[in-house]
Each structure stands twice: as C-alpha cells, then as structure tokens.
Amino acid sequence: MPLHEKLEVFYCIFEVTTPYVTQRQEMEAPRIMLEQRFIALVEQAAASNEPIKVAIRRPIPIWSQFDQQWFDREASIEFKNNAYVAKYGADD
C-alpha cells in the first residue's frame, strides 16, 4: 500500500458495549492508527471475562446513479467476546 494511502485520514466511531454502558468515541486519524486502536480494543475484550462488544463504524460516500447524488452508507465491523456471545447470543 502506498504511503499516501496509509496516511489518508478517515473519520470513524468506536463503540464499546458492556452490560452497564455503551461508550462511544469519534476519531479522525490515518487508517493505521484506527486499525491499531480497534485491534487493541478487541484484544482487551478478548481477555476479559465481562461481556464486551467492540464496534467500529464509518460513513462511506456512495454515488447513486438513479438519484444522481451522493449518499452516506455505513461500513462497520464488530467483535463480541465469548462472555458476550454466551449472555446475549451471536445475533443480538
């Protein structure tokens, strides 16, 4: 991947859900920093015995040929640790 692509800044939202609270953090940073943050949160959740779900979401502009305009669509990925799946199921 070329350096300019690695340094392109993206906007995203991190969400960490526990049985008690959902923490939400907005962040703008290069892709590599966002990836590192997500991986760190997933590793923390995987090591925990408490039910935790980690998600990262970001809008992606999509051109609609039908409407002739741009729309934001959400792209996301999430991780649920074993305790979360045992308590709430995989398809919460």
Image (spheres, rainbow, N blue to C red):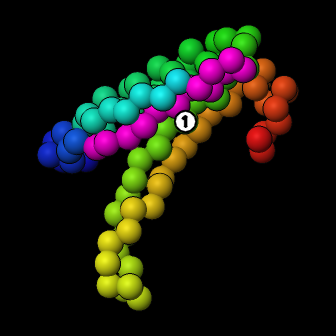
* Residue 77 lies in the magenta stretch: no
Q: Is residue 53 left or right of residue 38?
A: right
Give residue 19's position: percent from left, percent from top: 72, 20
Give residue 46's position: percent from left, percent from top: 64, 19
In this rendering, the answer to whether 69 lies above or below 3 is below
Q: The C terminus lies in which quarter of the figure?
A: top right
Q: Is residue 64 left or right of residue 47?
A: left
In this rendering, the answer to whether 1 lies above or below 79 is below
Q: Please name whichever residue, 62 or 22, is drawn nearer the observer in this view of the structure.
A: 22
- The residue lying at 72 percent from left, 13 percent from top is 50
User: Type of residue at label 1?
Assistant: Ala
- The residue lying at 51 percent from left, 47 percent from top is 76
The local crowd at label 1, few if under 14, some if 14 to 19, many if 20 or more residues have their Cα within 10 Å, is some
Q: Please name whichever residue, 92 or 39, is drawn nearer the observer in this view of the structure.
A: 92
Q: Please name whichever residue, 87 or 69, is drawn nearer the observer in this view of the structure.
A: 69
Question: What residue is shown with label 1?
Answer: 55
Give residue 88's position: percent from left, percent from top: 82, 32
**Secondary structure, magenta segment, majority class:** strand
* Residue 21 lies in the magenta stretch: yes
- SS type, badge 1: strand
- The residue lying at 48 percent from left, 53 percent from top is 75
Start-end of magenta stretch: 10-22
The image quadrant that residue 60 belongs to is: bottom left
The residue lying furthest to the left in this view is: 4
